[in-house]
Image (spheres, rainbow, N blue to C red):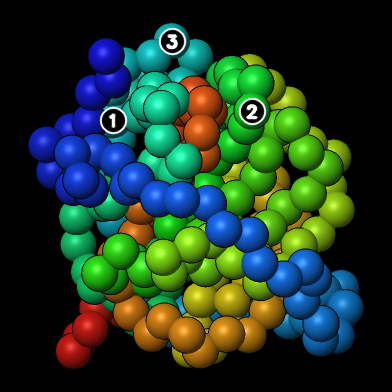
Amino acid sequence: MWRVKSAFSRISGGIVLAAGLFGCEGGGGPPVESASELKLADGVPSTRFDFEDMAGAPSGQAVLVQRAVDNTFNVIVAPGGPYTDVDVSVRFKPISGAEDASGGIVFRFADGRYYVIRANALEGNFRLYYYDHGRYQLASARVGPPSLGEWHVLRVVAIGDHIQGYLDGKLLLDHRDRRFRSGAVGVWTKADSITAFDDLTIRGVSVGG
């Protein structure tokens, strides 16, 4: 049985149920190495979340462990927002999974539609998708798969239509997409992934703020 602090929204009883549809490969544009780092304006507020107890957690013992394994995708949405521009980071530890062993950040979540960046311990890639009645790939980078049983850091910065994705401090994805403009933030897993999350930190510009 997995526990989520009551402040978090449990989408459709804790899980977003969805049939997986996979879209186009790649995502053109200039090399990521030449991209400048996106930054929010000074003074944008920051919110940090802790979860349940787990030995060895980076911030003491408080983490969220997503243990649901019977659904295509699992989304847990944090309170706050909706946000337009965001800078979000989270530590994640892929614990197990035969079909998938992933962790991701969901952003601009509204009406069941969202973007997600995710890393998978079973695959050598780091990817950005959007979900709208199916999951569609926007951009991908080759990486060494994050190690099972070890903590890693995901980060996404989205300002207007410009989106950048980081894994363990390295900028790997630089993409533009204007599909979704605002929404909530959360964490994501797929299929039989059991994944721990810690230090979810959201800097965001609230709609109308």
For badge 1, the amino acid type reads Phe
Looking at the picture, tell me which residue is in the foreground, 131 or 10. 131
Please give the name of the residue rendered at 22% of the width and 31% of the height, measured from the top-left corner. 4
* Placement of the N terminus among the 4 image quadrants: top left
Label of residue 88 in the image? none
Mark nearest the camera among 2 and 1 is: 2
Estimate the spatial distance between the alpha carbons at disc 3 and disc 1, rounded to whole Å.
Answer: 12 Å
Mark 2 and mark 1 lie on one chain; the one further toward the N terminus is 1
Q: Is residue 55 above or below residue 12?
A: above
Looking at the picture, tell me which residue is in the foreground, 208 or 169. 208
Q: Is residue 203 visible?
A: no
On the image, the x and y values in percent for residue 45 come to: 29, 69
Estimate the spatial distance between the alpha carbons at disc 2 and disc 1, rounded to whole Å.
Answer: 26 Å
Q: Which residue is mark 2?
A: 99
Label of residue 55 in the image? 3
Q: Secondary structure at mark 3?
A: strand
Asked whether, in this view, residue 75 is left or right of residue 110, the answer is right
On the image, the x and y values in percent for residue 146 come to: 73, 34
Q: Which residue is mark 1?
A: 51
Please give the name of the residue rendered at 79% of the width and 70% of the height, measured from the top-left corner. 26
